[in-house]
Image (cartoon, helix red, strand yellow):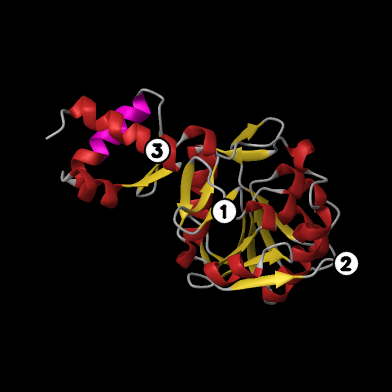
């Protein structure tokens, strides 16, 4: 039987070579309990060698990092506009809508400016500013501002989300993967997204095709938790079929 240090080194090399590992598989491969594997992964993460994920771990260089708002504002804009137009089909009259922070949800907000029957809840100050001249009821969560991104987070944000009910939540994505689910670049951001999911009757993920087969730092939800994913035509037929084993995929054409 391996010594703990030898076992952790073996796990580290496996993650470097494979990019990711699964706790259950490691437990069987090394003939130790899943609790032992979890302790090993915690130790490796403490040393900065790996990053733990939901059910396993990945190599740090495989992670998607946070992008400042101005850097992503004009990226894939045609795809984001097409996704936003499709999202409108899933908004009932007189609904309470949560809009996640992000550039795709911003495109949804722009298309809602002519409506008067909705209540919009958001933690994105740029979305709130976009809706200033509308006749919509807009609720901003409050909280600490993430500079250069425009997102609000922290205790005030959490408390508001714990005490509301919404009909629909449009979730923005940093990364989507069949095994890892939906992930976000920071723990704080994933916590806010989880609370938004819990506050809403249905959750739709809005994600352009560049977000698929990617992983970020912190787990948000499994694909099965989503009502569906709206994406663009850049998602391959093979990927569409693979993901549809877990969640409905709506692939839209750009103008």
Relative to residue 119, is residue 116 drawn left or right?
Answer: right
Residue under pointer 1? 213
Q: Is residue 184 visible?
A: yes
Q: Residues within 10 Å of mark 1 (few under 14, many from 20)?
A: some
Looking at the rendering, in which quadrant would you find the C terminus? bottom right
Instruction: Look at the image and say whether residue 45 sits in the magenta stretch.
Output: yes
Q: SS at mark 3? A: helix
| Rendered location of residue 132, percent (x, y) | 82, 51
The boundaries of the magenta stretch are 38-46
Identity of the residue furthest to the left in this view = 1
Residue under pointer 3? 15
Residue 71 appears in which quarter of the rendering?
A: top right
In this rendering, the label closer to the viewer, 2 or 1: 1
Residue 78 appears in which quarter of the rendering?
A: bottom right
Residue under pointer 2? 255
- Identify the mark nearer the N-term, 2 or 3: 3
On screen, residue 67 above or below 168: above
Q: Residues within 10 Å of mark 2 (few under 14, many from 20)?
A: few
């Amino acid at each position: 039987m391996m010594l703990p240090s030898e076992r952790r080194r073996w796990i580290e090399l496996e993650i470097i070579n494979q990019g990711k590992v699964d706790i259950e598989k490691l437990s069987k491969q090394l003939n130790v309990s899943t609790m032992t594997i979890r302790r090993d992964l915690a130790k490796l993460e403490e040393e900065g060698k790996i990053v733990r994920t939901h059910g396993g771990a990945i190599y740090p260089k495989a992670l998607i990092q946070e992008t400042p708002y101005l850097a992503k504002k004009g990226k894939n804009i045609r795809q984001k506009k097409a996704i936003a137009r499709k999202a409108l089909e899933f908004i009932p009259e007189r609904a309470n809508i949560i809009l996640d922070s992000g550039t795709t949800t911003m495109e949804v907000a722009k298309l809602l400016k002519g409506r008067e029957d909705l209540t919009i809840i958001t933690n994105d100050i740029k979305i709130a500013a976009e809706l200033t001249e509308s006749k919509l009821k807009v609720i901003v969560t409050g909280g600490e501002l993430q500079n250069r991104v425009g997102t609000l987070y922290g205790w005030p944000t959490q408390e508001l989300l714990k005490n509301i009910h919404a009909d629909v939540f449009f979730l923005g994505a940093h990364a989507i993967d069949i095994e890892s689910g939906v992930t976000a670049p920071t723990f704080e951001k994933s916590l806010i997204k989880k609370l938004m999911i819990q506050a809403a009757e249905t959750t739709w993920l809005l994600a352009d095709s560049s977000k698929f087969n990617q992983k970020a730092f912190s787990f948000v939800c499994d694909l099965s938790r989503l009502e569906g994913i709206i994406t663009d035509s850049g998602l391959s037929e093979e990927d569409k079929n693979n993901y549809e084993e877990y969640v409905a995929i709506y692939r839209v054409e750009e103008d």
